[in-house]
Image (cartoon, helix red, strand yellow):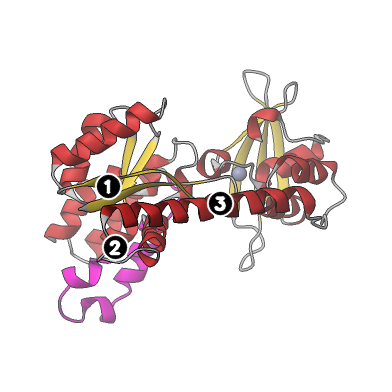
Amino acid sequence: MIFVPFTGVDHHKKCITFGAGLIANESVESYQWLLQCFVQTYPKAPSLVLTDQDPAMLQAVESVFKNSSHRLCMWHIMKKLPAKFPGDFLQSTDFRARLHKLVWNVFISPTTFEKRWIQLITEFKLATHVWLRDMYQMRHRWIPAYFRDIQMCCLMKTTSRCESSNSIFKVNSSPGNTLVQFLFCFDTSIDRQRYNQRLLEHKSYTTKIPLRTPLLIEKHALEVYTQEIFLEVQKEIQKGMVGSFITNVESNADGLEVFTVHHADKKTIINNSFTVTVDIANKKASCSCRGFTRIGYLCRHVFAVYRLRNVQEIPDEYE
Ligand SMILES: [Zn+2]
């Protein structure tokens, strides 16, 4: 039988199993049945579903999760690259590095992605390469640029999390097990997962993490986030204070403040420009880097503006 776990990411950035099923074969009907069972259990379908390129799964997900976005695992696609280019083409050119840089870029828009892809393919005279052409045709299924409007789209780009949770189930079970033994092993794994989550929960409330800035918003972040997420937010608050520069402020037609924020990285002093739009009355902010949509917490550019406007708490909707 085939074991199919449903894996997600929790507020400690750890894998969490929402459910699992056993199916007799990998047919469209079997997957459909399993997904329908999932839908009956959970009141809300996932906004984003990530799978490998299995054609039966593809069909089943589309027919059951009608309003969910379906994304294919990028790692599974990109690992096929060497097999698609016989000879020493990949070794003798920088095509591979440049393709990787392009496809994994989470900052660009679909239009920019398409423009750069065509430039790259033209430069290396690969317009007739069948696999690349197929991958380009299904670009909306795996390239991050096409998922940028989906909440927390960057938490999962590959099925590696799912595979690591599968391997935990495998460690606790063996191929000779009966169904009952297997289910006992499964329950043990789930109990461990829940226990680990409780430990992290406890750690989040009891461990003191030193603050790195004098800003009150950092203190507030420590109160509202789990430890794992706070450490990420803390980095953004710090970088909003140290490496980000506001170079322009103006008002738009709706009376909102529009800031131009640059941030520096290790290589260049100023290399990136982002637009942060703020409604100071209710502290709502949006940034052109789309950090909050991608990862679920505010970016350094918004924190730079909050600092200037003396916003001392993270607004409820961004917690
Ligand atoms: Zn930003």
Hey, which residue is sitting farthest top in the picture? 254
- The image's mark for residue 78 is 2
Amino acid type, label 1:
Arg
The reply to whether the C-beta atoms of the residues labelled 1 and 2 are less than 8 Å apart is: no
Q: Is residue 290 left or right of residue 280?
A: left
CA separation in Å, label 3 and label 2:
24 Å
Amino acid type, label 2:
Met
The residue beneath circle 3 is 13
Q: Is residue 90 left or right of residue 312?
A: left
Tell me the quarter of the picture where residue 318 sits: top right
Amino acid type, label 3:
Lys
Badge 1, how many Cα within 10 Å: few under 14, some, many 20+? Answer: some
Where in the figure is residue 175, as x and y percent of width and height?
26, 65
Residue segment shown in magenta: 79-108
- The image's mark for residue 139 is 1
Residue in front for this viewpoint, 127 or 313 = 313
Q: Is residue 152 magenta?
A: no
Q: Quadrant of the C terminus?
A: top right
Q: Residue at x 35, y 51 (%)?
A: 183
Where in the figure is residue 110, as x and y percent of width and height?
36, 42
Task: Tell me if I can see residue 244 in this picture.
Answer: no
